[in-house]
Amino acid sequence: MTTPAQTESTEAKAANTVVLTDVAAQKVKALIEQEGRDDLRLRVAVQPGGCSGLRYQLFFDERSLDGDIVTDFDGVEVVVDRMSAPYLAGATIDFADRIDAQGFTIDNPNAGNSCACGDSFS
């Protein structure tokens, strides 16, 4: 049973970090298992580039950097560096495996504009 205080802290946490859906967490787990390593985490970052100004990066990483924000989703650690955190606060990462969409998707409330490919935003 969840108390109101726990719900509020969970909602506040989601607004300040990246959220990984259950489907995406399962896919990340499967990919890490394929790598045969247990020290990898999903790093999500924002870098300059792309047709809209900023580009998402998702990759596996074993490093810990100063200021990293680490959030656990059912055993999957998602890491966001301190420079990317403001751009990604409240963003939801999902995984689609449909005929019209395949791969990881990011729904980012901070993105004012995005390009048609969905890989960059401003």
Image (tube, rainbow, N blue to C red):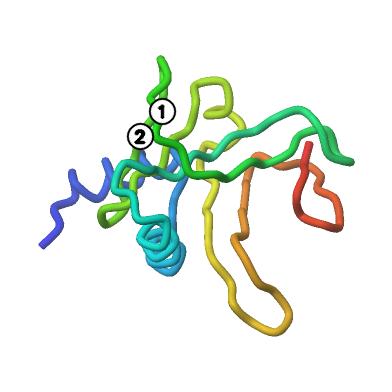
Choose top left, top right, bottom left or bottom right for residue 42. Answer: top left
27 versus 69 height, above or below: below
Is residue 64 left or right of 58 when viewed as pictured? Answer: left
Look at the numbered disc 2 and give the secondary structure of its residue.
strand
The residue depicted at 34 percent of the width and 40 percent of the height is 71
| Label 1 – label 2 distance at C-alpha | 12 Å
Q: Which residue is mark 1?
A: 63
Is residue 115 left or right of 70 when viewed as pictured? Answer: right
Amino acid type, mark 2? Val
Where is residue 120? Give x, y as percent.
77, 44
Look at the numbered disc 1 and give the secondary structure of its residue.
loop
Is residue 62 left or right of 106 when viewed as pictured? Answer: left
Amino acid type, mark 1? Arg
The residue depicted at 10 percent of the width and 62 percent of the height is 1
Q: Which residue is mark 2?
A: 70
Where is residue 80? Give x, y as percent.
48, 33
60 versus 29 height, above or below: above
State the count of labels: 2
The residue depicted at 38 percent of the width and 66 percent of the height is 26
